[in-house]
Image (tube, rainbow, N blue to C red):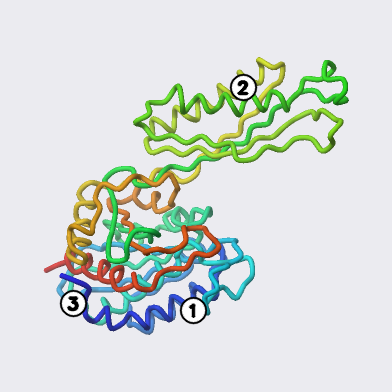
Amino acid sequence: MPVINRVAEMQDQIAEWRRHIHENPELLYDVHETSKFVAEKLKAFGVDVVETGIGRTGVVGIIKGNLGDGPVIGFRADMDALPIFETSGKPWASKTPGKAHSCGHDGHTAMLLGAAQYLAETRNFKGSVAVIFQPAEEGGAGALAMINDGLMEKFGIEEVYGMHNEPRLPVGSFATRKGGVMAAADTFEITINGRGSHAAQPHNSIDPVLAASHVVVALQSIVSREMDPLKSLVVTVASVHGGDANNVIPAFVKLGGTVRTLLPETREFAEKRLKEVAEATAIAHGATAEVNYRRGYPVTFNHDEETDFAVEIASKIVGPKAVNTGMAPHMGAEDFSYMLEKRPGAFIFIGNGDTASLHNAAYDFNDEAIPFGVSYWVTLAETALAA
């Protein structure tokens, strides 16, 4: 089954919605206008239940099928933008300096709106489809906020599916994998405490700059010499702050960075060893280390049966040769992971073509991907909830 004819006819309309959202980006939970736009569209489509304020500013619509009772499956799209000055030069570029849809959440929202309109018109399924529009994916854990507001229980969601665009993956193709498809993302801050002194008298100091330099190098040994190379681990020190003058050895230096993992046991190991290595290395230089390790989004873990089903649906739309079932995992993070911890489901990537990379100021969602994304959602619903 190729792209659905009715969906192809809807492409221009859905692209208009997408460009409206793109012009008016909002950050984190402050997606009030986007949520209002989504809720108004869902009500206009005749969606049976439209609830706002789930996870502060999230929106959920329930579309009931005409073929009798059945389960409820959830489809999720994220709505928030990024704090970036857009340079795409498109006519629909951001009207708000310093905010931009540089990750394609405008496209995700528009495609799920298109699917909601189609499903509300046809209702050729049993049970119900929950369309979930989530705030604060970009670092705010909006998925967890919606879960904590009773998302799964309140609407009786039994399975949940997500989609994200992928630049450089051709339009008209999909990619996914079983198991860890996106990494857990943790952050750390390390304060190296020494003793300040005049820079001309280093012997009177315990130099935290020197100790911090050795800590940065030592942390790399966790990946290169302590971790099985077949088990993905990233340890990155991304910031170093210490001192304000060229002739003063400071009393402390702060390091900041991130740890990315794909397996729970790797995550546990990395947290333990990062603390041990930082503390021991600082002590070796006469200093001390205070480590603040914060766990962020967990691994986005695709369930086997649901991933097979997602691949089957994508293959119906674009053909099996255009569906990569063994994609390399992304070491970026995604808070859809929280939903996959609560319910079985799968996360899939849809081709966005030859566009700028995600989180790039020049990025823009490719509207040519819309018919494929909407057809995926519709076909998944009608197949999963067939009579």
Q: Where residue 121 sits: x, y (%)? A: 25, 82
Amino acid of disc 2: Glu
Amino acid of disc 3: Asn
Residue at numbered disc 3? 66
Instruction: Tell me the crowding category of disc 1: few under 14, some 14 to 19, or many 20 or more residues within 10 angstroms, Cα based.
Output: some
Instruction: Tell me the crowding category of disc 3: few under 14, some 14 to 19, or many 20 or more residues within 10 angstroms, Cα based.
Output: some
Could you tell which of marks 3 and 1 lies nearer the N-terminus? Answer: 1
Q: For residue 296, which numbered disc appears in the image? A: none
Provide the secondary structure element on which disc 1 rests. helix
Q: Compute the Cα span from label 2 to label 3.
A: 63 Å
Could you tell which of marks 2 and 3 lies nearer the N-terminus? Answer: 3
Toward the front, the furthest residue is 354
Q: For residue 20, which numbered disc appears in the image? A: 1
Q: Residue at x 34, y 60 (%)?
A: 163
Q: Where residue 316 sits: x, y (%)? A: 17, 64
Residue at numbered disc 2? 279
Amino acid of disc 1: His
Is 196 left, or right, of 8 in this rendering?
Answer: right
Q: Residue at x 18, y 77 (%)?
A: 66
Q: Where residue 229 sits: x, y (%)? A: 38, 29
Hey, which quadrant is residue 320 in on the image?
Answer: bottom left
Q: Which quarter of the rendering shows the C terminus?
A: bottom left
Is 315 left, or right, of 42 in this rendering?
Answer: left
Vertical position of residue 83 compared to residue 64: above or below: above
Could you tell which of marks 1 and 2 lies nearer the N-terminus? Answer: 1
Toward the left, the furthest residue is 387
Q: Compute the Cα span from label 1 to label 2.
A: 51 Å
Q: Compute the Cα span from label 3 to label 1.
A: 32 Å
